[in-house]
Image: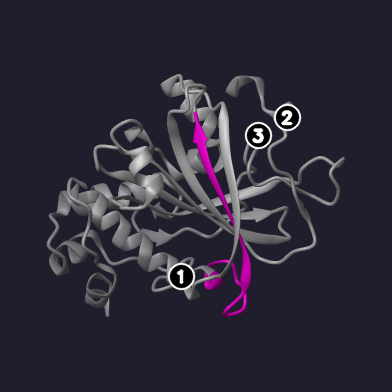
Amino acid sequence: MTENFYKKYRTNPADGLPKYAELREIIRAAVNDDYWREGDKLPAENVIASITPYSLGTVQKALGALVKEGVLIRHHGRGTFVAEAGKHPEMDKPWHCRFALNEEDEPLPIYPKVILRNRIRSNEKWAKMLAPDGGYLIQIDRIISIDHQFPVYVKFYLSDSRFGSFMEKHFEELEKTNFKTILHTEYNVAVSHMNYSLRFETFSKEIAEQIESKSKTTGIVYEILANTASFDPIYYQEIFIPPNHLKLLIGDPTGIPDIWK
């Protein structure tokens, strides 16, 4: 049974991904798929090393990274367990996922959960804008709860060569901090112009399952390309929004926090 997790969840990782990060993502996939559920004990480190191609040191580093991210928890003398799900932190200064009952109301709080982070390449037009040299992009997928009323699925992309620290951050930081704040404080990059578009789409089976929607649900895909004042593309994201009763507030420049201007 233990051996099956590696066979089932291993993938072809992007070139340059450290070995511990490969194993970290394999274990994360197993947890997200309920192969190991909340409170379950993982196999001992030496057992994982014996049934995978990774060294004991790599296993320890992968598990340590997941402990820091809150996916796993270690009990001294007992082993490593899948952490029990707690409340995810409210995101500070949301901008794109702003939902309200009416335009005059304050946007509702949102609660993100990071479920995937990887390096990828893409031939899409937006990818060539973010990485003109054809280099790697960082993809971060999140499920964002809108005031605990319904979830949306978000795919976020930015250049690995420009913003590589996003691959090293703990998930807790990525869940509570708006990415634009990280770009501003760590890279002195300010978002100035947004290109918005909307399309209707039947969600894939995977996305529908992630946001607990019915199969073949049709919703809105909200696309955002963020640029600097000189129209230098910074990031691109897609937000998959199921049918709901709220208003989506788009592009009100008067509400942009001063830190981003």
Residues in magenta, as a range: 208-227
Residue 2 spot, x, y in % from top left: 26, 75
Magenta span contains residue 225: yes
How busy is the neighbourhood of tag 2: few (under 14 within 10 Å), some, or many (20 plus)?
few
Marks 1 and 2, how far apart at CA: 41 Å
Residue 11, above or below 19: below
Q: Secondary structure at mark 2?
A: helix
Question: Which residue was labeled with disc 2?
Answer: 255
Question: Which residue was labeled with disc 3?
Answer: 93
Q: Nearer the viewer, residue 183 or 37?
A: 183
Q: Nearer the viewer, residue 89 or 226?
A: 226
Label 1 is placed on what type of residue? Answer: Arg
**Can the viewer see residue 48?**
yes
Residue in the image at 53% along x and 32% along y: 180
Magenta span contains residue 96: no
- N-terminal label among 1 and 3: 1
Kindly check if marks 1 and 2 are in contact, taking CB atoms under 8 A apart as contact. no
Q: Secondary structure at mark 1?
A: loop
Give the label on residue 37, or none: 1
Residue in the image at 24% along x and 55% along y: 22
- N-terminal label among 1 and 2: 1
Residue 207 spot, x, y in % from top left: 51, 68
Label 3 is placed on what type of residue? Answer: Lys
Q: Nearer the viewer, mark 1 or mark 2?
A: 2
From the viewer's perspective, is 21 left or right of 126?
left
Marks 2 and 3, how far apart at CA: 10 Å
